[in-house]
């Protein structure tokens, strides 16, 4: 008779791994990087290795451990696995605390580019408290009671065939999946969103065949953290960064233009 089997114990601390990172700025206090889509920010059940934290430990060495907790050293804010774009990571406890306070106070300049289904107005905002979806714990939702206050402002950059909108989003709050939830709740889910896009949108009928195929086959949410600006906690200098979306996002835009 074979006894019960138990999974191998996972390390209490993340292990250092050599994973390529696109670092835009680095000094003794912090790192600014352009995270690739597909990279999980910090270890969690099911993703104990291959994360941004593992990569940062491999890049920075042992001195990086212990900043901000063993499981997520240096992480001040996170991007969803399949969201690309700009992140700042602390290398010292002082900077970690200062940046965490700046994010909490919304003293950070952040903007995202997103491709959403449907034609949005020139500008506007979405509000509505966000909490766990009672029917699906892996999803967030706009909830009628409870949840956390959330506000997303947007402006239209370019419409494509009156069926898809390229928008810039700015967060007045920072809730889990905020942009994805607010847009989906408003009837404008992000292209490719595996969680909040549940059916083929009616707007897809307005696209040419090639554009429709590209939009419906896009394998991740079309969301990129394009701008990040903040005051350096130690030097007090303003740092500002901007990056273009990755190649898959750019290629999709070209197909949408038709």
Image (tube, helix red, strand yellow):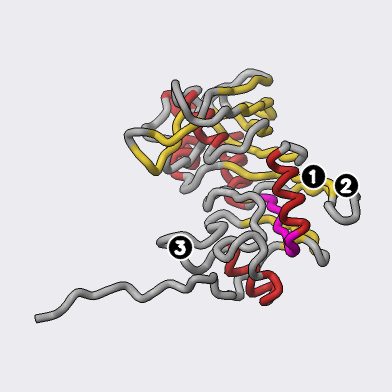
Cα–Cα gap, marks 2 and 1: 7 Å
For residue 47, which numbered disc appears in the image? 3
For residue 238, which numbered disc appears in the image? 2
Q: Is residue 64 above or below residue 254?
A: below
Instruction: Tell me what residue is drawn at x 75 percent, y 45 percent.
Output: 228
Q: Is residue 97 left or right of residue 126?
A: right
Cα–Cα gap, marks 1 and 3: 29 Å
Main structural element of the magenta stretch: helix, strand or loop? strand
Which region shows up in magenta? 85-93
Instruction: Tell me what residue is drawn at x 59 percent, y 23 percent.
Output: 126
Secondary structure at numbered mark 3: loop
Give residue 109's quadrant in the image: top right
Instruction: Tell me what residue is drawn at x 68 percent, y 21 percent.
Output: 123
Q: What is the crowding at mark 2: few (fewer than 14 residues within 10 Å), some, or many (at least 20)?
A: few
Whether label 2 touches label 1, CB < 8 Å? yes
Q: Is residue 230 visible?
A: yes
Cα–Cα gap, marks 3 and 2: 35 Å
The mark that comes first in sequence, 3 or 2, is: 3
Residue 21: say if magenta.
no
Q: What is the crowding at mark 3: few (fewer than 14 residues within 10 Å), some, or many (at least 20)?
A: few
Location of mark 1 (residue):
229
For residue 192, which numbered disc appears in the image? none
Q: Nearer the viewer, residue 149 or 79?
A: 149
């Amino acid at each position: 008779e074979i006894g019960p089997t138990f999974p191998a114990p996972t390390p209490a601390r993340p292990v250092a791994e050599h994973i390529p990172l696109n670092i835009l700025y680095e000094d003794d206090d912090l790192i600014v990087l352009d995270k690739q889509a597909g990279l999980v920010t910090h270890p969690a059940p099911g993703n104990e290795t291959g994360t941004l934290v593992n990569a940062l430990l491999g890049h920075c060495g042992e001195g990086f451990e212990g900043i901000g907790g063993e499981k997520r050293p240096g992480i001040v804010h996170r991007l969803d696995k399949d969201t690309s774009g700009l992140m700042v990571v602390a290398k010292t406890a002082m900077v970690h605390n200062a940046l965490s306070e700046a994010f909490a106070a919304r003293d950070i300049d952040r903007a995202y580019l997103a491709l959403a289904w449907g034609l949005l107005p020139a500008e506007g905002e979405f509000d509505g408290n966000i909490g766990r979806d009672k029917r699906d714990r892996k999803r967030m939702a706009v909830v009628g009671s409870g949840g956390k206050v959330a506000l997303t402002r947007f402006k239209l950059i370019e419409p494509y065939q009156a069926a898809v909108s390229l928008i810039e989003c700015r967060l007045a709050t920072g809730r889990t999946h905020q942009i994805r939830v607010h847009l989906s709740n408003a009837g404008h889910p992000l292209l490719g969103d595996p969680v909040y896009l549940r059916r083929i949108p009616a707007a897809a009928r307005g696209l040419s065949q090639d554009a429709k195929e590209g939009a419906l086959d896009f394998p991740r949410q079309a969301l990129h953290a394009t701008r990040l600006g903040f005051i350096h906690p130690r030097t007090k200098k303003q740092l500002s960064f901007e990056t273009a979306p990755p190649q898959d996002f750019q290629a999709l835009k070209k197909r949408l233009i038709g």
